[in-house]
Image (cartoon, grey):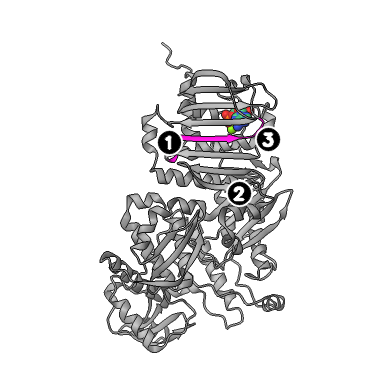
Amino acid sequence: MSKIRVLADHVANQIAAGEVVERPASVAKELVENSIDAGATRITIEIEAGGRRLLKVSDDGEGMVRDDAVLAFERHATSKIRETDDLAAIGTLGFRGEALASIASVARVELTTCIEGANAATRVAIDGGRMRDVKDAAHPRGTTIGVRDLFFNLPARRKFLRSEATETFHLTNLVTHYALAHPEIAFTFINNGREVVRAAQAKDLRERAYQIFGGEFLENLLEVNSGEPQVAHVTGYVSAPRDRRTSRDSQYLFVNRRFVRDRMIGRSLTEGYRSILPHGVYPAALLFIETPLDEVDVNVHPAKTEVRFRRQSAVADAVREAVRAALASANYVPPPIQEPAHFEMPEPPPRPIATATAAVSSIAPQPRIEFVPPPPPAPVSVPPVTEVSGDEIARDIELMIQSASSARSAAPELPPLNSAEKFAREVTLETLSANIRPLGQLEESFIIATDDEGLLLIDQHVAHERVLFDKYRALEAERRSDSQQLLVPETFDLTPAQAAVFDDLAPEFESYGFELMRLSGRTVAIKAIPADLPRGEARNMLSELLDTVDAEKKNSARETMRDEIAASLACHAAIKVNMPLAPEKMRWLIDRLLQTSSPTTCPHGRPVILRLSTRDILKGFHRI
Ligand code: ADP
Ligand code: MG
């Protein structure tokens, strides 16, 4: 007896839905893409209960005639391509013809649509893939699709949905992306009856970014505009190096105005910042890559968020160089001299040759960057980084070395940083004694000290970070956080994504001594900040945390989130590198460090103290 059978359409659709419809935001993505493809100038997205109860997208695009409105829900029904050859150059966002069929198979969908000049609009109702009703209705030119009760017929999938706050966060993020990619379209986003985003038609990306993020965000951005139209033309904005983020959440990447998550582009962006941003710190970016349609394959993934470039490395180079050029034009890096084609080839550190020196000295001094480049990973304790291959670590170290040597190009050559690991070792808790005597400072960043076993180097920033972290955690646990009132409250604008999590997180911030007040819309006033935190750091810190601590973490591990807040506070309030310290201050810092829970590692897991043992010194001088 034969055992193979062809699956019924509704089963096939539900299987396809597994790939296309992961969560409410993926439904919104398909619907918004359809509206854009239909030539809309106005798109409204309305959600209830994080998009599970209702997700509705309306547009004023070209609409559909009745036959098309019914056919649109068939699998592989599309108006966007006809032949295989069309796949080679896709100019629309959709083309697979499976989104509506998939969505309708796992929800209750009602579509109302009308073309220009028609007598009546058409309304089609489908529940779990079954056509219920087709009739006349009233609707202006355009289309409205309401998706209710997502996964009502797939309880297992429904269980995988996250909290309302998380789904709303993803939806907000998605709307933000599309609004940025299409300034010419007016976007409105309504969450549980409240208008969260309202962006009128804008003349360009700058105006749109202003509508979405506010003026402050834009002030710190550098314009990117370079590359080759035949390969990749790169435009948009990237942040100045002083604007630090701890995640990639503020990176918005687009290929031919399709928003993508692409590791390669993300990596090239980071490479553009080599030597001016340390590992684990990310720039903000709005990058638009335009390539000829036949240079890019968008048919890689059902959700269409991944792309494949025909000339992958040329695109990577274009992105990296475009970012580099933007940084150079703002004097953050010297103007491009001859770049080595591949970093993988270990190049000798750049020599201060005549032209390079001239170029370097002719530009304004680089603003001081206030963070510590992380020391190279020591053999025993690699900092907890996710998704980093050995190659990447190796390259990061190489970049760090390059940066260290170029920063000192005028000074006598020092041995590369990572050779320290051969003789200066991380101090372990067991070998730490209370008898530490400070001698002075190296580069106004590291305290030089001695103990019974040799010479110590203490990273002043991370040491103070550890001290403050323990202090903040203790105060918070005892509910006696210290705060300083600001005479004039400081205001700042949340991005839509930050606004979505703000209300949930505000009480946590307040338990550390912040006093925050939500003003109208997305503006927040800071009325008080934790003691010790310099005033100018408050905004940066809040914004960074709102970007990274998402609602998910809040639900799963409150303690982890409290640690994150304390670590961020400590980092922002701690003594910086490049800061002279009086002997008493060094003494004070060392004493405090020794009283902490973990004097040898900072809250982010980096070493605090390195030791050059007397034994190794003696060996080095051939005395033993
Ligand atoms: P695809 O977008 O890949 O073609 P979909 O299933 O998303 O597939 O949509 C099927 C077809 O329905 C589209 O090709 C388009 O012709 C039509 N359609 C869908 N949404 C809209 C809309 N908002 N306005 C006009 N036509 C639409
Ligand atoms: Mg589509």
Q: Nearer the viewer, residue 456 or 298?
A: 298
Task: Describe the element under mark 2 as helix, strand or loop.
Answer: helix
Callout 2, which amino acid? Leu
Circle nearer the N terminus (1, 2): 1
On screen, residue 354 above or below 74: below
Q: Which mark is residue 180?
A: 2
Q: Nearer the viewer, residue 451 or 31?
A: 31
Q: Residue 268 lies in what quarter of the image?
A: bottom right
Circle nearer the N terminus (2, 3): 3
Q: Is residue 101 visible?
A: no
Q: Residues within 10 Å of mark 3 (few under 14, many from 20)?
A: some
Identify the residue under disc 1: 52
Specify whether 42 is left or right of 170.
right
Is the residue marked 2 within 8 Å of ligand 2, measured from its CB?
Answer: no
On screen, residue 110 above or below 348: above
On screen, residue 353 above or below 44: below
Tag 1–tag 2 contact (CB < 8 Å): no
| Pair 2/3: label in front | 2
State the image coordinates of residue 596 (x, y, percent, origin top left): 29, 73
Specify whether 263 is left or right of 470.
right
Identify the residue under disc 3: 88
- Distance in Å between CA atoms under marks 2 and 3: 26 Å
Q: Is residue 520 visible?
A: yes
Q: Residue 603 lies in what quarter of the image?
A: bottom left
Q: Which residues are magenta?
A: 50-62
94 magenta-colored:
no
**Image quadrant of ligand 2?**
top right
Q: Residue at 63% across / 73% down in the picture? A: 350
Callout 3, which amino acid? Ala
Callout 1, which amino acid? Arg
Task: Describe the element under mark 1 as helix, strand or loop.
Answer: loop
